[in-house]
Amino acid sequence: MKTISTFLALLLAGVVSGFTAPTTSFGVRRSSSLYMSANEERTYIMIKPDGVQRGIVGNIVSRFEQKGYKLVAMKTKQATKELLDAHYKDLVEKPFFAGLRDYMMSGPVVCMIWEGKEAVSTGRKMLGATNPLESAPGTIRGDFCVEVGRNICHGSDSVDNAKKEIGLWFSEDELISWEDHSKDWVYE
């Protein structure tokens, strides 16, 4: 069962339709890194076309929410050649890259920014190994996929890369800073 916050996130991202999102929010302001506490960081998580097509976006969002991370931004997007070349610039010369790019352009992706303590390293652990056959049960890839070429999701591998990827996939005005009232129940 989807939580209300998951439903709202999916609604705002355009994954769920037929409802009107609220026009006002309490405690919402445009975001910048100035609103994060010193021990928090942001990570970029992307659900690839196979994850969107298989209808597991809500499951993935729920895992990050249940871990206690705060959703700062979320949207669906059709990736372009130029965007993918910039995102995967270290892989462009690899022999498999053309197939990867075609796969990434084969359908929409869901782009997300999650915020919290050690969000980058913990987010990667939650996703599991790049090769799903090496992913532990309980990880997203360990539970939902078997092929490295269809591994459902991407997660930033460092804080610096998270900043670059967030800047590549989102404009500053798309990031929202809001008061997470569950924070006192997640962090000491």
Image (cartoon, rainbow, N blue to C red):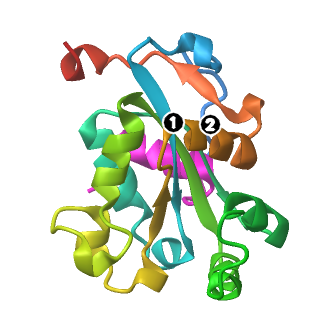
Distance CA(mark 2)–CA(mark 1): 6 Å
Residue 145 occupies quadrant: bottom left
Residue 141 in picture, x, y percent from top left: 31, 70
Residue 105 in picture, x, y percent from top left: 70, 77
Front one among 94 and 99? 94
User: Is 11 colored magenta in this rendering?
Assistant: yes
Left or right: residue 52 versus residue 169 is left
Circle 2 Cα neighbour tier, 10 Å, few/some/many (<14 / 14–19 / ≥20): some
SS at mark 1? helix
Left or right: residue 188 versus residue 88 is left
Which mark, residue 163? 2
User: Is 89 colored magenta in this rendering?
Assistant: no
Residue 171 in picture, x, y percent from top left: 77, 37
Which residue sits at x=35%, y=76%? 131
Instruction: Give the residue type that dot 1 points to.
Output: Val
Contact (CB < 8 A) between labels 2 and 1?
Answer: yes
Is 144 drawn above or below residue 57 in the view shown? below
Question: In the image, which residues are magenta?
Answer: 1-19
Which residue sits at x=62%, y=36%? 163
Split into 4 quadrants, where in the image is the C terminus? Answer: top left
Is 133 drawn above or below residue 41 in the view shown? below
Q: Can residue 125 be seen in this view?
A: yes
Is 10 drawn above or below residue 88 in the view shown? above
Which residue sits at x=44%, y=12%? 37
Is 124 drawn above or below residue 32 in the view shown? below
Q: Can residue 2 be seen in this view?
A: no
Instruction: Give the residue type that dot 2 points to.
Output: Lys
Front one among 16 and 175? 175
Which mark, residue 35? none
Work out which residue is located at the far right of the displayed protein and give it. Answer: 82
| Residue bearing mark 1 | 159
